[in-house]
Amino acid sequence: MPFTPLTTPTSPTAPATAPGTAARPRRPPFPADSLVARSGAAVLHAVLWLMLATTLYGFGIIQMLPGTPATLAATGGLAWDAGWFAQIAQQGYHYTAGGQSNVAFFPLFPLVWRWSGLGPTGIGVLNAVVFLSAFTGLAHALRLSPRYMLLALSVPSSLFMLVPYSEAWFFLFGALLLSGLHRERTAWVLVGLLGCGLTRSASALFTPALLFMVGVLLAQGHRRLALQWGVGGLLALAASLGAVLAYQTSFPGVPATGFVDSHVAWGHLLDWPKWPLYTDAGTDVVWYSAVAFAVGVASVGGCLWLTGRCAWLLTKGRPAPSVSPAVLFSMGYCVAALLFVLGYQGGKIAGLHRYIFGAPFFVALLWQTSRWPAWRLLTYGGVAAVLLGLWQAFGAWGQFPNFSLDQSAWYFGLTTAYALAWLGVRHGPFARELGTGLYVFNLVFQIYLLNMMLHGVWIE
């Protein structure tokens, strides 16, 4: 006798709704492409970061976090550049002839700190909120998926958004700039350029990036936008530079050349880079800076290819390739950042990962790579071979300090795998698992670097 179920299941061919009515597709309460979903991704990241950081701190694996008693006792919460920003916020600018002085830093963030009345921990929390809000807005403007949002948020250099540094405010105005470029909002572009110029010495890096973007826009046939953004952008950068100079020289004893003189005292002099490249942070950070170096070199290649492609298409009377102005500007910025670090530090690449990964322009480049079609395995092999050759700039194959050749091969092999992981999360049967592993690794390394920084260890 056949088994008779207690409840008769619905026939798979039976209509799910009453006769005469059309079935409506179920819509999720918060679509993945909505601002609410992206805000949720930012909140989720903040919660996961707090859970992991406090767990590592509770187990004694790390000893310092912003605001903890050990940190406040050791540095007062003012490690490295945070001390200079606090000095400007409390006392204003002062100049020391022939020596280091706080004139090397721009005033917007110290003024915000002064007006807020917050201590080191409080301003760090405010910076984190500003960063997450700006990041969410940029991700929404670019239509970056929540999965890629989490990856971009986990970038280890994001640790500078959690301490009393100007990075969060630079990110805020940079995100406004990129959002304006992507959505063709000229007012956003000009305010973004002005705000970045008041926060950091952005003019030196932004001017070539702006001119490159304008050139490609002209080749694309967007003459009106090129004129508005080119002329308006240069005026905004000049206005920010003039405002900073006027504010700094309003303090007694600060000369008009104080900014340049202060950087000379730090050893930032125009010089040919010495090979192999290095950083005072040691092997803990060299590999990460090497990946930032690879992003800069790739941006150089992208800019050269686009320039050549535009010139060739113009001879044929055809428009240039369609690329978002936000991506064009970001590539130009990364090229300028790479050349600045190589040209003014004599082979030391300190700050390169901070300039590239700790800025909103990497987010635009990540968005662009997420839209690339799937690669074949052979393509990944070619990219790996190029990267393994590129690491020779750091002496990977015979000149890497205190490493034997097999140790160096393993070190830079892992560096190559890390770089390929960022490209491999786009497609493939294990893309989600790879993305999850990359996210967790980034968070752990970010918290590790933050712990080192709060101990007073140089991490750039």
Image (cartoon, rainbow, N blue to C red):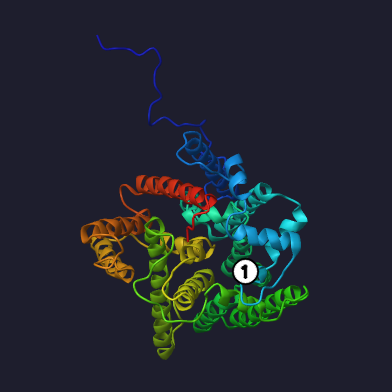
Residue at 60% x, 73% y is 202
Q: Nearer the viewer, residue 18 or 102?
A: 102
Quarter of the image where the N terminus is located:
top left
Quarter of the image for residue 191 reads: bottom right
Q: Is residue 188 visible?
A: no
Q: State whether residue 270 is above or below residue 119.
A: below
Q: Identify the residue under disc 1.
A: 200
So how many labels did they put on this image? 1
Mark 1 element type: loop
Quarter of the image for residue 195 reads: bottom right
Rendering coords of residue 311 (x, y %): 42, 87
Q: State whether residue 335 is above or below residue 452.
A: below
Instruction: Please indicate whether residue 352 sits to the left or right of residue 397 in the image.
Output: right
Instruction: Please indicate whether residue 285 sits to the left or right of residue 231 in the image.
Output: left
Rendering coords of residue 241 (x, y %): 68, 77
Rendering coords of residue 104 (x, y %): 63, 71
Could you tell me the amino acid type at mark 1?
A: Arg
